[in-house]
Every structure is written in structure tokens, then in C-alpha cells.
């Protein structure tokens, strides 16, 4: 029995380096699997700006032969494909783009370009039945609020926004009062929108494009300048991207594109 065990251990010792070498040799192949030059400009990122980006892409395609594909959703829904063919990845905040760069080694921080800003807003039910007019109204007892948080498992631009706004004036009681009214910490804007409807919430701290894209459900209440928080829309171009992808990025900040992006709340 001992002789058999020693033989197995010896065999494992010989085999282990071979397995390690095999795993190591697969890394270059994985690194080289990112080959986006396929004649299509492909952009991936979190949902929110996709409709505005689609309008810009449509304008681009009217004057260019190359098609633009825009894919959005939670990172896990597109990450695997983006590893293979993403020309561009967009981030809906700097912190979310920084997280993306950990997952996509073919993109680097020097490839990231902030291109637009938009402010956080209060989204309320269409018609504003609770008559919410300002952020301070959310501190009153009985107001039901949804906030967006990554909760350590999701990459979302909404992470920390509510705390930044509530604590902006340096009043701890504002943070406490607001927190008492939170009915859902949702992992992503899409999940927050769903929770807002299902929980019959009164308010949701989010971005302008969600209201613009859902006018029958939501209405926007601006946040005063002394509490306002802005985060950017940024783009990272792959060094291996189709050459026209860089031209499309320049078009994204053209006068024509700025008008289209402004309709969704994005400004430069």
C-alpha cells in the first residue's frame, strides 16, 4: 500500500510542473485573443448612455461605411465577448472605468478619455405625487428612496452618489435621515429602476438619461448646486481597435454629436 502511495506521489510531482507550464503557456494565447479588427466598431459598457450613443452612431453611419454596434448591460453579461472584440469600452464614471480596466488587460489607463459630464438627479414618479421639489424633501420621514450601489459585487456609476449628496454640507444628520428612508440598495441602475417600480418608491437618485428614456414612469427633480454631484462618461480605445474607431471617438465630441448627447443630459 505504501509503495503504491509513494509511486502516486512521485508521479504527481513529475506531473505538476508540466501542468503549471501548460497553464502558463495558455496566458499568451489568452492575451492574444483580443482581436477587434473585424470591420465593425464595437462599444461595450453599462446601460444608461446607450440610447444617446446610438443616436450619435446613427449619424456617423449616414456618412461612413463602417457599422457601429453598441452593447450595454451589467458587466457579466458582455464581459466575455468584449474580451474578444471590443474596440471601445465606456465607463459611466471614473471609478467604474477603473474597475473595468482590471478585467480588460488590453486596455490601459492612458487609453481612457473623459468626454462628457452629467449631474445626479432625483427621479420621482411621473406627475410627482409626493410634491418633491428639492433634496431636503427626501430627508422627511416616510419618503421611500431607492439608491444604486455596487455593494462590492457590481460595477456601477451610482456607487456612493447618495452619500456624496447627503453629506455634501457636512451635516451628519442629513446622512442619517436620508439613510433611514432608503428602501433598496440596488446593484446597478437597471436593478434600481426595477426596484423603484416594484417597491412603489417615491424617489431614486440616478442620472438624467433614465428619466429621458422613461418619461411615462419618471420625472426629474434637479439637485441644487450646493449639493450637486457630477460624474463623467469616458471612453477607452483598444490599441488593437479598428482604425476607424479612433475617428468615431473624435466624432463623438463633434458639434453634431454634442447636440445629440445634450438631449440625454450629457454636456462638455
Image (tube, rainbow, N blue to C red):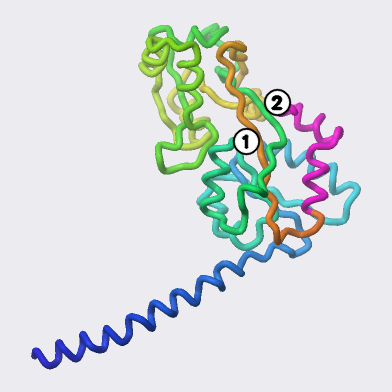
Using residue 231 as the reference point, say whether residue 136 is left or right of it. left
Towards the viewer: 170 or 215 = 170
Q: CA distance from mark 2 to mark 1?
A: 11 Å
Q: Position of residue 63 (x, y in %)?
A: 91, 48
Q: Main secondary structure of the magenta part?
A: helix
Nearest to N terminus: mark 2 or mark 1: 1
In the rendered image, which quarter contains the C terminus?
Answer: top right
Categorize mark 1 by other alpha carbons within 10 Å: few (<14), some (14-19), many (20+): many
Q: Position of residue 197 (x, y in %)?
A: 50, 26
Q: Identify the residue under disc 1.
A: 48
**Among all residues in the image, which is located at the extreme front?**
110
| Visible residue check, residue 197 | no
Q: Which residues are magenta?
A: 245-268
Reply yes or no: does residue 257 show up in magenta. Answer: yes
Q: Is residue 184 magenta?
A: no
Which residue is label 2 attached to? Answer: 265
Amino acid at each position: 500500500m505504501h509503495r503504491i502511495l509513494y509511486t502516486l506521489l512521485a508521479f504527481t510531482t513529475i506531473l505538476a510542473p508540466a501542468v503549471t507550464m501548460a497553464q502558463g503557456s495558455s496566458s499568451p494565447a489568452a492575451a492574444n485573443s483580443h482581436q477587434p479588427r473585424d470591420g465593425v466598431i464595437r462599444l461595450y459598457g453599462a446601460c444608461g448612455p446607450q440610447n444617446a450613443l446610438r443616436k450619435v452612431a446613427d449619424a456617423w453611419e449616414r456618412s461612413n461605411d463602417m457599422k457601429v454596434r453598441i452593447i450595454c448591460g451589467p458587466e457579466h453579461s458582455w464581459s466575455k465577448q468584449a474580451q474578444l472584440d471590443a474596440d471601445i469600452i465606456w465607463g459611466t464614471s471614473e471609478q467604474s472605468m477603473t474597475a473595468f480596466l482590471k478585467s480588460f488587460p488590453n486596455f490601459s489607463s492612458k487609453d481612457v478619455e473623459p468626454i462628457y459630464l452629467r449631474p445626479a438627479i432625483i427621479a420621482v414618479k411621473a406627475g410627482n405625487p409626493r410634491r418633491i421639489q428639492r433634496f431636503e424633501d427626501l430627508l422627511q420621514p416616510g419618503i421611500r428612496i431607492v439608491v444604486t450601489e455596487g455593494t462590492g459585487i457590481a460595477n456601477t456609476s451610482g456607487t456612493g452618489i447618495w452619500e456624496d449628496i447627503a453629506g455634501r454640507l457636512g451635516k451628519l444628520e442629513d446622512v442619517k435621515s436620508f439613510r433611514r428612508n432608503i428602501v433598496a440598495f440596488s446593484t446597478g441602475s437597471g436593478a434600481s429602476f426595477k426596484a423603484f417600480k416594484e417597491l412603489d418608491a417615491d424617489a431614486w437618485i440616478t442620472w438624467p438619461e433614465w428619466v429621458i428614456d422613461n418619461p411615462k414612469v419618471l420625472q426629474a427633480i434637479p439637485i441644487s448646486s450646493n449639493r450637486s454631484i457630477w460624474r463623467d462618461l469616458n471612453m477607452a480605445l483598444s490599441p488593437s481597435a479598428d482604425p476607424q474607431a479612433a475617428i468615431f471617438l473624435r466624432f463623438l465630441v463633434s458639434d453634431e454629436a454634442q447636440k445629440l448627447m445634450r438631449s440625454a443630459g450629457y454636456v462638455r
